[in-house]
Amino acid sequence: MTEQPGAGLPALPGPWTAILDEARRYPSPHNSQPITVRVHDDRRAEFCYGLDRGLPAENFGIPFAHVCAGVFLESLATVAAAHGWAVRETLRLAEMDFSSPQRQHLLGGLELTPVPVTDAAREQMAAFRRRRTSRRPYDRRLVDRAVLEEVAAIAGGMGQRFGCTDEQVLVDDLIRINQETLFDDLRDDAVHEEILTWIRTSKRQAAATRDGLSAETMLMPGPLLRFAMHHRWLWDLPLVGGLFRRVYLSTMRGVRELGWLTGPFDTPGDHVEAGRCFLRLWLAFTRHGIDLHPFGTVITNPRSHAAFVERTGIDESGGQMAWMLFRYGTGKPPPRAWRRTLDAMLLGRETTAVA
């Protein structure tokens, strides 16, 4: 699908249309694009988290809502800088209440100020436009150590520790832990219900919603994915369950290296900074032509998280947490994801001051 930037969108004051039209491509930890924006005037806006698009049933599902906010803010800053603007934030870091009748949780205010466009800003913007999540099989080539050193330095500068391994036995063990997490989560009624909410089993459905986790990006036949997810008890049967598992796990071939991030993860402020860091690392990998695929439930599932930390020997003392695990490498380009419309991102124009 091709789209004209800003096509069919409401006219927004100042540079907001151009900036938000690109910033909406931020990667969401929940595959749900929950961030919404209310533009006040040509310089000011506020942004919210749509509670109906979160995953509160998962352990750490609520903290990852603020991680999503951090990813969005880093994306917004990246796009704005390439358009000649800096973003000043006034954040409201209150805990999210997913039972609240007010379904838009205010995250804070945004203000644009003009700045010169630098070569670094242009390079970062180019990486943002190229960035994709690749669930395809990877080849066996190791990533250049200099790239990993650059990523580690970026993480360290943001108060995070980047860990990685190419030890094949450890890689295989961590992949197995991640794989088994889905089967464990399917036994949890609340988590299973959330998973069903975001599965897109046809191109038509994915085109209509422009969000969620599509069968195409998972390289699975849509009817098989729909049947398997709605009949979760089949996964435990000796023969049929084994078939479902093999199809689901077929995209995990060629995993040669894994990386993870450990850092402060106690408060909403920690979670926002974690999200900023992850997007910045992702763009660093992208600049070097490296694909990336984050693993979610291995972090949010308590049993899998404990197994992951024990197997890697990660130290989570002193408020530290291993909050992200991902594979990285090179392979065939992934299918192009459907882009959400900016109309769904906007709450509407207002002229009142930012709350």
Image (spheres, rainbow, N blue to C red):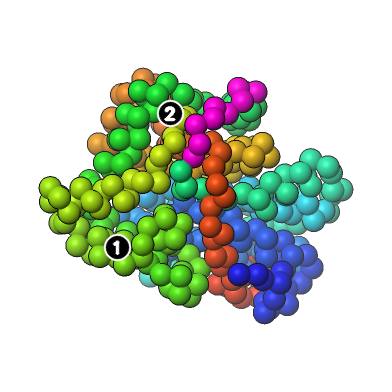
Mark 2 or 1, nearer chain start: 1
The quadrant of the picture occupied by the N terminus is bottom right
Amino acid bearing label 1: Leu
Which element carries disc 2, helix, strand or loop? strand
Tell me where residue 224 sits by quadrant. bottom left
Disc number placed over residue 186 in the picture, else none: none
Which span is picked out in magenta?
A: 138-146
x%, y% of residue 110?
Answer: 67, 57
Viewer-nearest of labels 2 and 1? 1
Report the Cα–Cα distance between label 2 and label 1: 40 Å
Q: Which residue is mark 1?
A: 224
**Frontmost residue, 239 versus 283:** 239
* Horizontal side of residue 234 vs 56, given as left or right: left
Q: Which mark is residue 320?
A: 2
Rendering coords of residue 234 (x, y %): 16, 56
Residue pictured at 65% horizontal, 23% vertical: 146
- Which percent across, then down, holds residue 11? 73, 77
Q: Main secondary structure of the magenta part?
A: loop
